[in-house]
Image: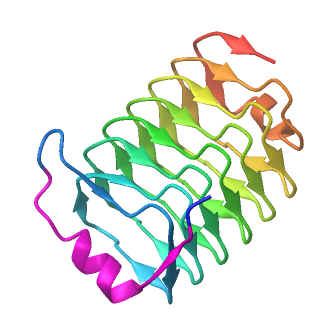
Amino acid sequence: MTERQEISSDELVQRLSVEPAFGFFVDLSDHVVVGDVDLSGRALCGLDFSNTRFSGAVSFAGSLFRGISWFRSVEFCDHANFDDVCFFNDARFDDCRFNEGADFNSAEFRGIAAFDNCEAIGRLNLNRALANGNFSVQGAKLRAGAQLKGATIVGGLWSSGLLGGSAFADPNCEVYGRIQR
């Protein structure tokens, strides 16, 4: 495993303050981000946060993710806010950990939304979220459960091995594609 490099929240914001361009991404993998991060309302290019730890609260609320977004094996030590975001491409949260829960209320996933094997100690909120591609939570551990009131999953729901995901059977969550349990 690669040793993580420390980066301040201000430096992180600066590195992500680039004009989004097709095929371009910012590699911020293998870091420890010190302090709270506020990237609310930004247009972001593709990014790779794989194996990064956010020590403080994180807000991407209202942001547009214009490229593939890699959050694989990321640890969010404090609350993560992804309310009202739009992922134009795949959003990969495989093997990540939300220590204080996460909000994806009214989020739009235009590509794959993958939360395979992630762990959420706090609640995972996806109220009114829209997933146009596959939504996958295979092997996820949702310790405080999930909320999906008014959510719509078009591309199918993949949830085999899911622990604590009774909300995925919520009658207020519509699933139009295949359901794999």
Task: Indicate the quadrant containing the N terminus: top left, top right, bottom left or bottom right.
Answer: bottom right
Residue at 76% x, 33% y is: 168
Q: Measuring 34% from the left and 77% from the top, which residue is drawn there?
A: 12
Residue bounds of the magenta highlight: 3-20
Q: Nearer the viewer, residue 16 or 6?
A: 6
**Vertical arrangement, residue 18 with respect to residue 129, above or below:** below
* Place of residue 136 in the rendered image (x, y in percent of width and height, measured from the top left): 64, 30
| Residue with the most extreme top position | 178
Q: Position of residue 18 (x, y in %)?
A: 14, 65
Query: How far across and how far down the image is residue 169, in percent?
Result: 80, 29
- Residue 87, relative to residue 137: is it above or below? below
Look at 81% across and 18% down and name the residue there.
181
| Nearer to me, 1 or 114 | 1
- Quarter of the image holding residue 76? bottom right
- Residue at the location (51% across, 52% down)? 71
In the image, is 148 to the left or to the right of 47? right
Q: Position of residue 61 (x, y in %)?
A: 41, 66
Q: Is residue 19 magenta?
A: yes
Q: How many marks?
A: 0
Placement of 37 over or under 48, stated as above or below: below
Was residue 149 drawn as part of the magenta stretch in this picture? no
55 sits left or right of 91 in the view: right
Instruction: Indicate how the structure is coloured in the image.
Output: rainbow
